[in-house]
Amino acid sequence: MLVVAYDNRSNVEIADPILEEIEDAMVRTLLHQEIGVECEVSFSFVSADEIRTLNKDYRGKDAVTDVLSFPMHEDFINHRQTIIKNNPYLPLLLGDIVICTQQAESQAKAYGNSLTRELCYLSVHSVLHLLGYDHMADDEKAAMRQIEKEMMGDD
């Protein structure tokens, strides 16, 4: 259902059991969204410096952030049938996920979570972005947060 190409450019080692939990969280999200084809995600763990540069270059924000999502398809969730139909190859590339491990560690500590849980949450959040969800408007934010809670078992 999901192919993940990992790249760890951070100074935090991410063990295989953590990667398996991250993948499980992403697969749950794809199943929840009824994505019925095999998908691929490029997934990078990076330093605070690198994500700050990416955030500045792509979003115009000169600040460290926890995760960046780079969707391959515009508004996938509303055009999924056309995108899937017009894609001659599988797995279907959804896009890129970039997580700052330093920020994830900091947030995990602040929220009283494990690093694994924080990485899973950020992965679910990012997959939703790859599928076309956003949280700019209050109603979109509420919908996205509800799905995240369900995927993380917080409901």
Image (spheres, grey):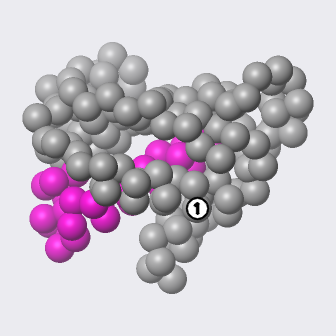
- Where residue 110 sits, quadrant-wise, is bottom left
Q: Which residue sits at x=76%, y=22%? A: 89
Quadrant for residue 92, please give it. Answer: top right
Q: Quadrant of residue 20?
A: bottom left
The residue identified by callout 1 is: 28
- Above or below: residue 90 compared with residue 112: above
Residue at left 65%, top 38%? Answer: 39
Q: Residue at x 31, y 55 (%)?
A: 18
Q: Residues within 10 Å of mark 1 (few under 14, many from 20)?
A: some
Residue 62 at least partly seen? no
Type of amino acid at the residue the image marks with label 1:
Arg
Q: Position of residue 42 (x, y in %)?
A: 47, 30
Q: Is residue 112 left or right of residue 26?
A: left
Residue 14 x/y as whole percent: 23, 46
Q: In the image as oriented, which residue stretches furthest toward the front?
A: 16
Q: Is residue 102 visible?
A: yes
Residue 75 percent location from the top left of the image: 70, 36
Residue drawn at (73%, 29%) of the image: 90
* Residue located farthest toward the top when viewing the structure as drawn: 57
Picture coordinates of residue 134, whole percent (x, y): 56, 47
Task: Tell me the magenta residue range.
Answer: 104-131
User: Viewer-proximal residue, 6 or 106?
Assistant: 6
Main SS of the magenta segment? helix
Question: For the view shown, which residue lies furthest in the bottom direction?
Answer: 155
For numbered disc 1, what is the local secondary structure?
A: helix
Viewer-proximal residue among 133 and 99: 99
Position of residue 127 relative to residue 72, above or below, is below
